Image (tube, rainbow, N blue to C red):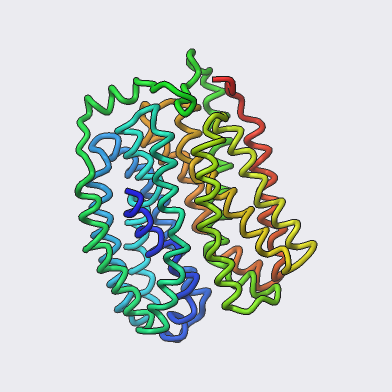
Amino acid sequence: MGAGQTLAWASSYYLPALLAQPIATDLGTTTVTVFGAFSLALLVSALLGPRAGRTIDRHGGRIVLAATNLLFALGLVMLATCTGTATLYLAWAVIGIAMGSGLYDAAFSALVRVYGQGARGPITGITLIAGFASTIGWPLTAWLEASFGWRNACLVWAALHLLLGLPLNLVLPRVSKALATAAAATVSAGPAAWAPAPAPAPAQDKLASMVLLSVVFAITWFTSTAMAAHLPALLQTLGLPLAVALSLAALVGPAQVGARLLEFGLLRKMHPLLSARLATAAHPVGAVLLIALGAPLALLFILLHGAGNGILTIAKGTLPLVVFGAHGYGARQGLLMAPARLAQAAAPLLFGMLVQRWGGDALWFSAALGVLAFGCLLAIKVDERR
């Protein structure tokens, strides 16, 4: 699943950062139009997320994830053969269907179906591997585009879905509904197994926690997507050459993985809510330092942003598990992430306009959002001793 997720993220989410300009030049349009098509894909994925979660709750993740490999391949072939704006948007709409059912939310739901309350460790393991998606994807996409053109780069990614991603997802285990129900009711021993509160929380508390988590996830996804789409260009506005900016941006992946190793080790003994609060503060701190001191602090910003994003990716899977429990996880996750996917859909266009207008000062906006997310996590009340 980790390798499959690496492929899925590298060939969709991280693609426009390097191919938007070549696509726009070839089709005689603007990068804004290309990012608009990417935003359409994210919007489609937001609409399909809840349904994908319910499907995994009922039938497991194996068939759903395998089907997305076929959809990714189809969408990438359509993208490689597009001839204008209409076919460009249609191709990204198909990719959006695959993204709505084939990225982390679906993988986390599949893991919870297998492991129940003990899914925190496997979720961390998956994100450790897939954390290298940008580190692998950006250099590989750049090399393919420079050597063979952007259309052939898309075809190579499509082939990898059929030759690598599809077989990997087809060997995932089948999990019956009875076994999934038993797993949801089981709490494994150890500090990584955080149980929900022993007594059901009042309905108003659950609703408040749902709203707060939705806001946190929306901000997290917005910032993550904005950086994925514009980080190389953002660093260039600070005076860094393209090669340096790309090299620094590629360090987001290792920073994510390093933080996830920390989460898997030292922070494993900490309640997920506490580690999420620390992670939420990382991007604002790094952004303020970069704005104040300029390009020499670019590396520190990359490391802080990547580390925070790495832990928050795990938190998207573990926080709903510890706050609400494993029963109905997939459907609930789809609802929680629907606003996040809408924010994600707006991120490429909105943050791109901010970068064009303000340059590096656009980070003030993402930093303010990070402070708001930190406040929302402070407002969530759980028994953090458990």
Measured as percent of width and height from the top left, residue 244 is found at 60, 74
Measured as percent of width and height from the top left, residue 370 is found at 66, 48
The answer to which quarter of the image holds residue 7 is bottom left
Q: Is residue 113 placed above or below 35 in the rendered structure? A: above
**Drawn side of residue 89 relative to residue 231, left or right:** left
Q: Let me know if residue 59 appears in the view.
A: yes
Q: Let me know if residue 37 appears in the view.
A: no
The answer to which quarter of the image holds residue 121 is top left
Q: Residue at x 46, y 22 (%)?
A: 195
Task: In the displayed orientation, state which residue is furthest to the front.
Answer: 265
Q: Residue at x 73, y 67 (%)?
A: 296
Q: Is residue 210 placed above or below 131 in the rendered structure? A: above
User: Viewer-proximal residue, 43 or 238?
Assistant: 238
Q: Is residue 90 placed above or below 67 in the rendered structure? A: below
Measured as percent of width and height from the top left, residue 58 is found at 25, 34
Q: Residue at x 20, y 49 (%)?
A: 170
Task: In the displayed orientation, state which residue is furthest to the top.
Answer: 199
